[in-house]
Amino acid sequence: MSHAQSFIRAHLPVTPVPGIVDVHLHKAGPSSGVGRWAAEGPPPYWAFWWAGGLALAQHLQACPALVAGRRVLDLGAGSGLVAIVAARMGAAGVAASEVDAHGRAAIALNATLNGVILEDIVGDVMNAPSPAVDVILAGDLFYAPDVAARVVPFLDGCVASGIEVLVGDPGRSPLPRDRLTFLARYQVAETGAPKPAAVYAYRGAGPYPVA
Ligand SMILES: C[S@@+](CC[C@H](N)C(=O)[O-])C[C@H]1O[C@@H](n2cnc3c(N)ncnc32)[C@H](O)[C@@H]1O
């Protein structure tokens, strides 16, 4: 077990995920001390669940046929929540892409915790050709303009090569609305009181104003 995984197991309590049936994750609390990682590298987004991922996870539990028997990539996986639910819903194979190495350590722990096997846990795949999957799931990946500016052309290419893409998002400003078709809305408890977040089909091409 890596140093990061030992830290996560010791300091991030296993917590049930609100609204998601039978999934638990290591989640940071006030005394977890994950701020030390923010000082050294990217913010520890993986230590929390996010509204977009919660909506996508609820949608997969409501509509398992979206992933059952299909090869899935969770793009910007964070804690691995969406990948774990896709695996639970019978995906033929699930990979998780997370740019933060500490996040990849957390994803591996969280997968084991929930009794699922992820085929691959990888870093940034967005400079590579479209992956060999049937479905890409992007939970709360449009959280910053610079990230969205990379995600949009990558997903455009994936859709053009025949991959289905689903996006979960609470309505953040970099969301490329001109490329999305609304599918469903869920109440999600990211922090505190529940708030709405939506699931969309990502259609691809179209003018997108890069901020
Ligand atoms: C807001 S969090 C959402 C995490 C998770 N999908 C969820 O909904 O709970 C976005 C995640 O995307 C990751 N990320 C950002 N750019 C990425 C990239 N180029 N490749 C893979 N992951 C990336 C961040 O490190 C972060 O963990």
Image (tube, helix red, strand yellow):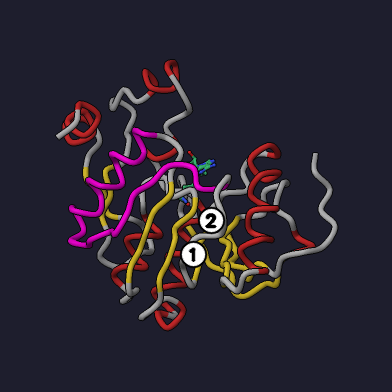
Q: Residue furthest front?
A: 129
Q: Is label 2's Cβ within 8 Å of ligand 1? A: yes
Identify residue for label 1.
Answer: 56
Compared across the picture, whether 51 is left or right of 144 comes to left
Q: What residue span does the magenta drawing correspond to? A: 101-126
Residue 158: say if magenta. Answer: no
Percent across and percent down for residue 103 are 36, 38
Percent across and percent down for residue 19 are 38, 63
Query: Which quarter of the rendering shows the C terminus?
Result: top right
Q: Nearer the viewer, residue 70 or 181?
A: 70
Identify residue for label 2.
Answer: 52
**What's the amino acid at mark 1?**
Leu
Query: Which quarter of the rendering shows the N terminus?
Result: top left
Compared across the picture, whether 127 is left or right of 21 comes to right
Secondary structure under badge 1?
helix
Residue 108: say if magenta. Answer: yes
| Rendered view: 56 above or below 140 | below
Q: Nearer the viewer, residue 120 or 65?
A: 120
Q: Mark 2 packing: few (<14 Cα in 10 Å), some, or many (20+)?
A: many
Percent across and percent down for residue 147 are 63, 40
What mark, if any, has residue 137 been given in the picture?
A: none
The quarter of the picture where residue 143 lies is top right
Write the residue at 61% across / 63% down: 158
Q: Residue furthest bottom?
A: 65
**What's the amino acid at mark 2?**
Gly
Q: Is label 1's Cβ within 8 Å of ligand 1? A: yes
Marks 2 and 1 close (CB-CB < 8 Å) = yes
Write the residue at 29% across / 59% down: 119
